[in-house]
Amino acid sequence: MQEGNLISRDPTQILRNSLLRPQEAFLRAGDLVFILPRPNKSVGHNTEALLRLILYSFKKFETADIPPSIRPGRLDLQDDGTVHIEWDPDIPGFEDHMSIYDPSFGQRNSNLQSRLEATSNLQDQRIPWDWKTVASNLKTIDYKSYMTSSSTLLSSLQQLFRYGLLFIHSIPPNPDSVRHIGERIGPLKETLYNSTWDVKSVPSAKNVAYTSSHLGFHMDLLYVDNPPGLQILHCLRASTQGGESLFSDALRAVTRIQHSRPDHYSILKGFPVTYKYHNNREWYQQTRPHIEVVTSPHEDPKDTFELHPERLRLPHSIKAINWSPPFQAPFLVDIGENNAKSGFPRYFRAIRRLKKELEADEAVFVQRMKPGTAVIFDNRRIVHARRAFEDRGGERWLRGAYVDTDVFRSRLRVLREEAT
């Protein structure tokens, strides 16, 4: 289909032409949007009508009930630009209904990108960053404004979507503040650590996060089926020496690798890595590649968008990145040096390159968390680390929570919709 030819046309003309000459046109019947291929010889010629569906809301009929020969039976253009269509034959039980389209419908559905924006309402692009980029573009948000202003919440979540990182200041010194910050977005995610949890150094810790040692770059809970989308850390005490928080954009790292070493990128996208947590009568384990890609039929992995400031072309296919060496388990594939089929030697070279990109000086954003501040970051994109600290004579206490990706994106979509 030549979608580019439809972009500049008047939407009502697109629909009118669908009845007058052979072509594909975007049409809507009830609660569906679909592409109807026009017949080659005559309007009345039967053809397989339904090629693609984009569901908008709860459907009152089943897709399988749509007649294969469905076509526009009558089309009326109203003075206000609204288009009315009656279908022939219609869906059984809906024979007397009329589809009504506002004038902007054709434009909203004229090409792939327009359809994605109309259905997801997430027009903002993710922007890969180095520390200079993020330091100059991030705005620290006031807690009171974040909690009370819808416009502040919208701009905050837009920033979080673009950069995967958000800082909030002037937070009350209350252990429940992290809950309030998270629930401003939506329900908190329950995990084996409960809905909120503490990050303190404790004796005989079963998790390296609860020690004063250096904690390398990682993402949380990659050993569960649905890792948290957002992580929130609220600093309540910070009187120790050291303990700075480090952040790096894994999206930037893998995008750079994709363009400089596509062979490494391919390995990182396919080689199975197992993550495991086995403590205190609990055993969580999952196997996943370092790069997860989108499998939705609405998104073509070849589609790319040019991004500022690095002018890298970010593939639409990157869904999530997985990096958590502290919780990596033995490989479930044979990695023996005599087994060339395992691909392990190539995988080893690829992860060394990824580690180098993540830990490069220009990639690492350093932030010393102060009492009354919090950070929210995308746990499926941003790796975080912590420098070692001296836990004698001082205290370092952070309170944490998680929010699922679906909850975050739902809130952002609704805020965008309400703002328009």
Image (cartoon, helix red, strand yellow):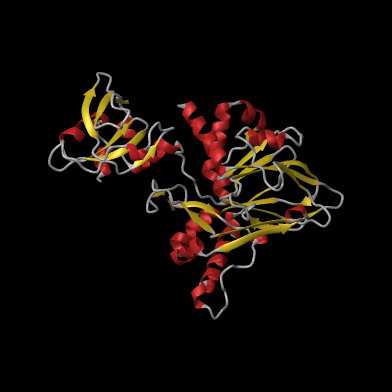
Q: Identify the image quadrant of residue 363.
A: bottom right
Q: Residue furthest bottom?
A: 338
Whether residue 393 sits left or right of residue 410 in the image: it is: right
Residue displayed at 59% across by 26% down: 149
Residue 56, image x, y percentages: 41, 34
Above or below, comparing residue 104 to residue 374 in the picture: above
Q: Residue furthest front?
A: 93
> In the picture, which quadrant includes the C terminus?
top left
Above or below, comparing residue 379 to residue 122 in the picture: below
In this figure, what is the number of numbered marks?
0
Above or below, comparing residue 157 to residue 326 in the picture: above
Whether residue 380 sits left or right of residue 244 in the image: it is: left
Residue displayed at 71% across by 59% down: 278
Above or below, comparing residue 397 to residue 284 in the picture: above
Residue displayed at 76% across by 58% down: 213
Q: Nearer the viewer, residue 174 or 295?
A: 295
Q: Residue furthest right?
A: 393
Residue 247, image x, y percentages: 62, 51
Q: Identify the image quadrant of residue 87.
A: top left
Q: Identify the image quadrant of residue 171.
A: top right
Visible residue check, residue 109: no
Whether residue 215 sits left or right of residue 378 in the image: it is: right
Residue 130, image x, y percentages: 55, 52
Q: Nearer the viewer, residue 412 or 43?
A: 43
Residue 259, image x, y percentages: 44, 60
Q: Nearer the viewer, residue 192 or 418?
A: 192
Whether residue 355 sits left or right of residue 4 in the image: it is: right
Visible residue check, residue 394: yes
Q: Residue furthest left?
A: 41
